Every structure is written in C-alpha cells, then in structure tokens.
Amino acid sequence: MDNWLNRLIAQSNGRPFTMDEAERIAEFAESLPDRLAAAKKLEDSQKWLAKQLSDAVAPKAHGWGLPKDPFTNDFTQTLSAIAQAMLLDDPKLLDHTVIAPFEALAEALDIPADELGELYTMAWQALSRRLDVKSVSLFLPYFSYTARGLQANDFDSMVETPMPIFDEAVTV
Amino acid sequence: MLTLATLNTLRDRYPTVEERDGMIEYASTVRARLTAVQELDKVERDVIELTLQKTKILYPNFVRYHAAGWEKGYRDMQLLLQYMAKAMYLDDAKYYDDAVLIWVRSIFKSLNFTPKFLRDSYTILKDAVRAKVKPRTFALMEPYLTHTIDYLSDIPEPFRPEV
C-alpha cells in the first residue's frame, strides 16, 4: 500500500532512520489514540451514516435510471476507507480507495460523479454533529478530500484547502 | 508485534479491540523506543567489537576459510543490529524478517556457516548488548536478539563446515 509511512520505511532501506524520520513516526504514533477514538466513533455511526447516504441518493437514483438503493455497500466501504486514510494520516490514499473507484462507477453508469461528491458533503454535515471536536478536526480533511475529489472530476485540479462548507462544519 | 503494519490491512474494516489496544500501547512506548534506538546507535561499535573479540577466541580458524571474515562479520552484525532497532522501533518483527534476516541467513548458509557458530556468535552479540545498554533498552531489544539467534541457527549442518 502506497502511503507516507510505507514510503518512509522503504526509503530508509539499508540504513537507520534519520532523526527527522524517527520523529515523524513518533509524532504519528502519539496521535494514534485520538485517531483510533475518532475511527471508533465513525464505526459506531457507520450504519446510520450509510443509511443517510442511501436515503439521499435514492431520489437521484430514480433520475439516473438505477434501482432505489444502488450504492449501500459502496458507501459502507468508502466510510471504512476514509477511516483508514485518517488512521494512516494520508488523504491521498483516498485517490485509490474511494475517488477513482467511484469515478469509474459513475462513468460506467453514466451518472455525474460530482453529485456523488455532494453526498459526502451532506454526510459530513450530518456526521460532524455527532462527533467531538477532536474527531471533527481529524476527519474533516478526509471528507473534504473525498467530496472535492469527486466534484473536481480531475485530481490535478484539486487544491489542498478544505471546501468552505467543511470550514463551516467545524464550527457546528 | 505488527502495530503500524496493521493499519495497511484496514481498507474494508475497522481495527479490532486487540489491534486498538496494541496501537495505544505502542503509542505509549514509542518515545522509550526512540530513546533505545539512540542508545543502541551510541554503543553499536563497542557491542560489535566486544562480540567479535569473544567470537574470535571460540573460532580461531574462521578467518582461514573466509578472507576478511571478521570485517564482513562486523558489517553483518551492524546491519542486523540496525534492522533489529528499526523493527523494535516500529514494533514489527515481520519487517525485520522480510527486510534482512531471511536474506542474511541464506547467505550464511551458502558460506557453510554451522548452526553452532551462528548460535554462539549471535548469543555473544545478545550478551554484549545486555552489557552495554540500560535494562529498558535491552528489554525492548531482547525479543529481536533471541529471534535472531533462533532463526539464524535453524539451518542444516553444512556438508563441509567452514568456521
């Protein structure tokens, strides 16, 4: 799996970690209890949140000529993928685990990917009200990245800053 | 002991209670692990020189079979110690095996090293580490040092021993 930690370990092949590398790992390790607590909160809310997403997509699905509840499993999987990316402190994981598969799905079904992205904006608004401040700050970049990635329809055009809607959600 | 590597396996699931507990425990020890890595780095030369000094007494004929054998032995022990320290820091024994230990054992086998030679020399290395570092550092390293002894010496007797 291509993430910063695996890259750092691979790059240090044949030598000890540099102090910068060791410190990066230590800081990350020390953030794990908060990350794990946030992931547990998403896990506890996953069924509810996947239902929110499914309910939101239902009216759209009719317009797209799809069954009422087309993506339940996909939504569930993307939420655990978002949790994994947050746990690993690497939003770019979502390029491969969420954004590219959903874009391929959207293209195959001839539906607008940006509308799927809107669903994750909606999901974030709902979820952020259930989370504590620390979990909100940990998950914000990942839901933002997902929504922006799907709405951009082009990774290269994506910018790193969260969308305004996500900035607002932090203050909820 | 696959703390951080566990994170790579979570795409379609969340951490189990045991995995969560393991990572929280790891987080609480990571600074001690970093201190241990730094301590090992400082004593590395002394540890290996002490090890080779004692091994030379036990195996005086070794250098007859292997030109620059002790110099290469220094390099091998340095490599293994550094990888043990990295694995201990990451709390990942599999990383140590995959990155270096399996490969090194295959080389040692090809050089007709005996199981006893490897057990003796790496037991001396373990004792040298114990003698040169603080008990906390040794406690963190002990599983890797013991695993190294057991794994390296788990080879067949060579047809023509060269030690």
Image: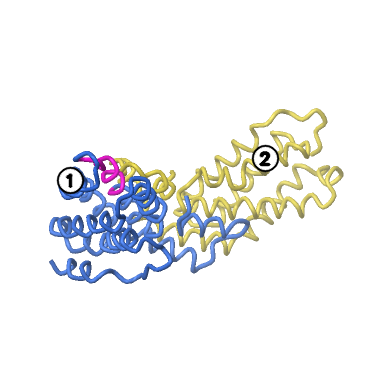
Chain colours: A blue, B yellow
Left or right, A106 with reference to B34? left
Task: Indicate whether residue B159 is drawn in magenta.
Answer: no
Residue ID for mark 1: A58
Q: Nearer the viewer, residue A33 or B54?
A: A33
Chain on which label 1 sits: A
**Could you tell me which residue is drawn at 28 percent across and 49 percent down?**
A79
Q: Do the residues labelled 1 and 2 touch (CB within 8 Å)?
A: no
Q: Which of the two discs, 1 and 2, sits closer to the camera?
A: 1
Percent x, y of residue B84: 55, 50
Which segment did they paint magenta? A69-79
Q: Which of B154 and B104 is in front in this view?
A: B104
Same chain for the residues at labels 1 and 2, yes or no? no
Q: Which of A17 and A2 is in front in this view?
A: A2
Choose top left, top right, bottom left or bottom right for residue A116. Answer: bottom left
Residue type indicated by callout 2:
Arg
Chain letter for the residue marked with disc 2 in the picture: B
Give me the residue at 72% from left, 40% from top.
Answer: B108
SS for dot 2: helix
Q: Which of A91 and A28 is in front in this view?
A: A91
Query: In the image, what residue type sits under mark 1?
Result: Ala
Q: Position of residue A42 (x, y in %)?
A: 22, 50
Residue linked to disc 2: B105
**Residue drawn at (46%, 59%) of the image:** A4
Task: Determine the CA span between mark 1 and mark 2.
Answer: 59 Å
Classify 10 Å Cα crowding around label 2: few (below 14), some (14-19), many (20 and above). Answer: some
Residue lying at 37% horizontally and 50% vertically, measured from the top left: A107
Image location of residue A126, percent across then percent down: 15, 56
Q: Residue A119 carries which label?
A: none
Check disc 1: other Cα within 10 Å, few if <14, some if 14-19, many if 20+.
some
